[in-house]
Amino acid sequence: MLDEAWTLSPAVALRLEPFGALAYHFGNRKLTFLKRPELVTVVRALGEQPDVRSALVAAGIPDAQHPAYADALAGLARTDMIRPRTSEQEAVA
Amino acid sequence: MTIAPERPPVTAAPRPTGGSLVEQFELGLDAPICLTWELTYACNLECAHCLSSSGRRDPDELTTEQAEAVIDELQRMQVFYVNIGGGEPTIRPDFWHLLQYAVDHQVGVKFSTNGVRLTPERAAFLAGPSCAGYVDVQISLDGATAEVNDYVRGPGSYDMALTALQNLQDAGFTDAKISVVCTRQNIGQLDEFQALADRFGATLRLTRLRPSGRGADVWDELHPLPHQQRELYDWLMAKGDGVLTGDSFFHLAAFGEALPGLNLCGAGRVVCLIDPVGDVYACPFAIHEEFLAGNLLAEGGFKKVWQESDLFTELRSPQTGGACAKCTFYDTCRGGCMAAKFFTGLPLDGPDPECVQGYGEQALAGDRTIPSSSQDHSKAGPTRNQPVMLKLMTRPPTSACAESPLAGFEPALSSGAHDQKGCCS
Ligand code: SF4
Ligand code: SF4
């Protein structure tokens, strides 16, 4: 996953909260809690970076924690909170 | 230019970071997760245990324009969905308009109804593209048979609910909810409720009876007996996987293993109630002046009440467990339901009246004063739809059924995806 391009699902809205954020999927109506502000930064950076690893680096996540973040992102992918970016969608940045 | 506040604001201690999700939720959020909005106090029924003592419309109920403004504000605050109830919300003439307005403004709706207005046409509308899957329908049913249901909800109410479920199913509306308040009379029908849900392609939702509203008058007779609480717990453990509970049974955690979901009283922290006149209470089961935080028609609107009211600030400050702190189950039971304690006259920092360790019964046997209700919209005289139970009582009653806080898991960094279970509608 670390070398792939991902993005926040278009059906998802993030609501910032003191502990991190709530992510709500308007399509499947699942509510998920992002339990760290850093994870919120990563999730938001996904769409602007060429791949997941770059998003982690941009958010200042130390290399050692990349696997843990990859796990968390995989969990978010299971409910379509984030999804793989297709080739036509170019990274914005 | 605003005028300086007359009172200094209550300042909360700096918020600790980290900790569990429950701990973070206890400190409150910028906007509620589980918001219940009762649109009217009017109701066609008069259920014996109505949490909001509904029956008659209040002349000061929000106008259509005021209600639209509330939805606009909820959209700005990113309250992603609301639980709409009453009274019977569908008898407000602008109900369907407000439903559409909410959906069009990214505020999903789950509404509770006794089914009175769920005609085939309305069912088709709900299943159709204009609701875009943003609408959940919850039909209240408090008995798996007419006999048990109509005893508390009134004659004809069982057939009305089943007709509504049939109309929804025929229209292709998927996954309606059958919402049951668990009582002494219906705990033995859990399998039958599940069979009913299966028959209509619906999801079963079980919630706890609280002594709120008219529920206070009938609680002694309706609330499950200790061995029935055990029966309910065992049933949920064995068969509760696909069943919604609104996380309302966390006091049962003290039987052993905690039930799935977030174990916490969300009142004023992640949960609140907007009543038909715009008053904001800590929880739908706490409609009493003690838990009134403010009115959203005042300057600053709902946001100011939610974020700055003295009551909510206090509810978000660290609480002591009182007499419960020594209990081994305090971590998951958290002393149970604030509203249940309040309306039975028990101290808020002590055990729940239905404490499964038996401390509630002891407390109930001691000195206590049951608070008098601070609002009552019950119908004045006896009516045709009055449930048998009420005829046996001296004082009138109506409808609605709801529940409580949140649902959650705690994996490392994120998450847990929840359907909208974990709320209070
Ligand atoms: S129903 Fe009881 S436990 Fe649930 S939020 Fe309200 S007061 Fe708290
Ligand atoms: S003593 Fe308090 S914490 Fe322990 S089970 Fe009873 S209500 Fe829950």
Image (cartoon, coloured by chain):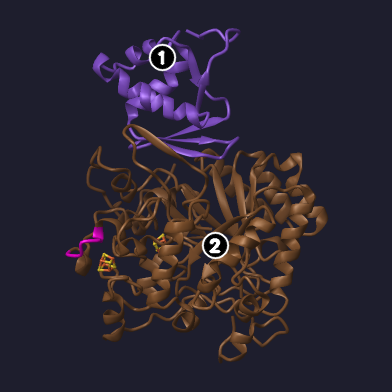
* Residue designated by label 1: A52
Using the rendered image of the protein, determine whether residue A58 is visible from the camera's viewpoint. Answer: yes
Q: Nearer the viewer, mark 1 or mark 2?
A: 1
Give the colour of chain A: purple
B125 to B246, vertically: above or below: above
Instruction: State the mark number for residue B275.
Output: 2
| Count of marks overlaid on the render | 2
* Residue type at numbered disc 2: Asp
Mark 1: give few (<14), some (14-19) or many (20+) Cα within 10 Å.
Answer: many
Question: In this picture, which residue range is highlighted in magenta?
Answer: B326-330
Mark 1 residue type: Val
Q: Colour of chain B?
A: brown
Q: Name the quadrant where ligand 2 sits.
A: bottom left
Q: Specify the label residue B234 is tagged with.
A: none
**Secondary-structure class at tag 1:** helix
**Residues tagged 1 and 2 counted as in contact (Cβ below 8 A):** no
Q: Of residues B69 and B167, which is closer to you in this image? A: B167
Q: Residue furthest left?
A: B326
Q: CA distance from mark 1 to mark 2?
A: 46 Å
Tell me where residue B377 appears, x and y as whole percent.
59, 76
Name the image quarter holding the N terminus of chain A.
top left
Where residue B175 sits: x, y (%)?
A: 65, 49
Q: Ligand 1 closer than 8 Å to the CB at disc 2?
A: no
Q: Residue at x 43, y 74 (%)?
A: B228
Tell me the residue at 53%/51% (across/down).
Answer: B242
Q: Chain of mark 1?
A: A
Is residue B112 visible to the viewer in this orientation of the structure?
A: no
Q: Within 10 Å of the Cα at label 2, are there few (<14), some (14-19), or many (20+) other Cα atoms?
A: many
Q: Position of residue A52 (x, y in %)?
A: 41, 14
- Examine the rendered structure and indicate whether residue A23 appears above or below residue B126: above
Q: Chain of mark 2?
A: B
State the image coordinates of residue B28 (x, y, percent, origin top left). 35, 48
